Image (cartoon, rainbow, N blue to C red):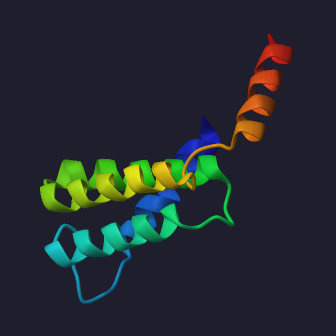
Amino acid sequence: MRGRALVMVEVDFCLKMLPSSSWYGSREWANSVLRLAIQELKNKGRVLSARQLEVFYCLEVLEEAGFVWQVKRLRNHIHLAIKKGIFTASPCEADSLLKKREEAS
């Protein structure tokens, strides 16, 4: 849990430090958060669970701030990434995760 809290602090810090021309909570800031989340969706070089955590955190932040349009666009991109298979575990990865869980039980 401590690791997850640390990641959230880092992500939250990044969201607050987006381009200086936009202030936290502005429409420009929300669009920057949307761009950041979409880039992270496509970042195949990073661990899937970390990407999921960051993207869903961005989604939550946008929802809380009331940016409905950006939330809808991000959800569209999430569904598209799932459909393309770049935002879900491959069958091989999913099988190995299930085996690890069964061994731990």
Q: Position of residue 47 (x, y in %)?
A: 68, 55
Tell me if residue 39 comes above or below residue 6 in the rendering.
Answer: below
33 vs 90, nearest the viewer: 90
Tell me if residue 46 comes above or below residue 96 in the rendering.
Answer: below
Q: Is residue 1 left or right of residue 60?
A: right
| Residue sitting at the far right | 103
The quadrant of the rendering that contains the N terminus is top right
Q: Position of residue 59 (x, y in %)?
A: 33, 52
Q: Residue at x 21, y 54 (%)?
A: 72
Q: Is residue 8 in view?
A: no
63 vs 102, nearest the viewer: 102
The quadrant of the rendering that contains the C terminus is top right
Q: Residue at x 41, y 64 (%)?
A: 37
97 vs 4, nearest the viewer: 97
Q: Residue at x 82, y 25 (%)?
A: 100
Q: Is residue 15 in view?
A: yes
